[in-house]
Image (spheres, coloured by chain):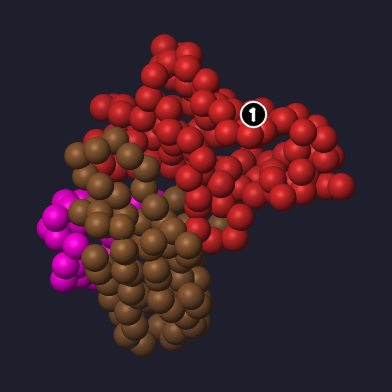
Chain colours: A red, B brown
Amino acid sequence: EDKVVQSPLSLVVHEGDTVTLNCSYEVTNFRSLLWYKQEKKAPTFLFMLTSSGIEKKSGRLSSILDKKELFSILNITATQTGDSAVYLCAVKRTDKLIFGTGTRLQVFP
Amino acid sequence: ETGVTQTPRHLVMGMTNKKSLKCEQHLGHNAMYWYKQSAKKPLELMFVYSLEERVENNSVPSRFSPECPNSSHLFLHLHTLQPEDSALYLCASSQQGMNTEAFFGQGTRLTVV
């Protein structure tokens, strides 16, 4: 059975800290791995990763994929209170997205 | 604004009611999805429509009935729901055949009383 596992389930940090969110997967017919940020309702797209070892970066956020070990990490440096959200990892299999439970990040001033 | 619009944003219904959720996408995509998000559970895929044909139905109870009249619109018809069906229902769209991301609507927060 396909599965996507995220850890930790929740994380509480102070502004300025650096955090690493983890996502491991066991999915047949893998096409890509996606990260989304969900603040209130609609998940918003962050990154799509298809190749191992190539870091994607957007401001203070970066992500990398390891297709041999079947995991990805999402790093956030110099966290801000606006980074507080649930971060969702999803694996795309043909046209089906399989989601993990998410990591709830809370950043306090 | 993601280009995917869902209505209503909130819905409270009794177990004997019939209601419908609506989703509209303005992105020119050819695939649309319904997801259910319950507390502390992963997003659960319910239905997939590709080119207006249902291609996936993940063992969803028959009290949920999807309808896709065209590539821009998707409905979820609800009848005789149970309290455990209370959840956030998210609609998404994507372009089938391309390895691109899905875009989500704001969701409908459904409460069954």
**Secondary structure mostly taken by the magenta-highlighted segment of the chain:** strand
- Residues B67 and A47: in front is A47
Residue B67 on the magenta span: yes
Q: Quadrant of residue B100?
A: top left
* Residue B92, visible in the rendered structure: yes
Q: Can you tell which quarter of the image residue A107 is in? A: top right
Residue furthest right in the image: A109
Is label 1 in a helix, a strand or a loop?
strand
* Most foreground residue, B109 or B103: B103
Residue type at mark 1 is: Asn
Quadrant including the N terminus of chain A: top left
Camera-side residue: B13 or A87? A87
Q: Is residue B97 left or right of residue A89?
A: left
> Which stretch did the figure color magenta?
B44-71
Q: Quadrant of residue A41?
A: bottom right
Badge 1, how many Cα within 10 Å: few under 14, some, many 20+?
Answer: some
Residue at (51%, 40%) from the top-left corner?
A46
Chain on which label 1 sits: A
- The answer to whether B31 is drawn above or below residue B13 in the figure is above
Report the residue at 48% width, 21% height from top: A65
**What residue is at 82 percent from the left and 35 percent from the top?**
A16
Towards the viewer: B50 or A98 = B50
Q: Is residue B22 depicted above or below A97 in this figure? A: below
Residue B12 at x, y = what percent? 49, 82
Q: Is residue A5 magenta?
A: no
Position of residue A65 in the picture relative to residue A17 (left or right): left
**Vertical relation: A86 (above or below) A64:** below
Q: Is residue B104 above or below residue B67?
A: above
Q: Across the whole image, how many numbered discs are drawn on residues?
A: 1
Residue picked out by circle 1: A75
Residue B78 in view in this figure: no
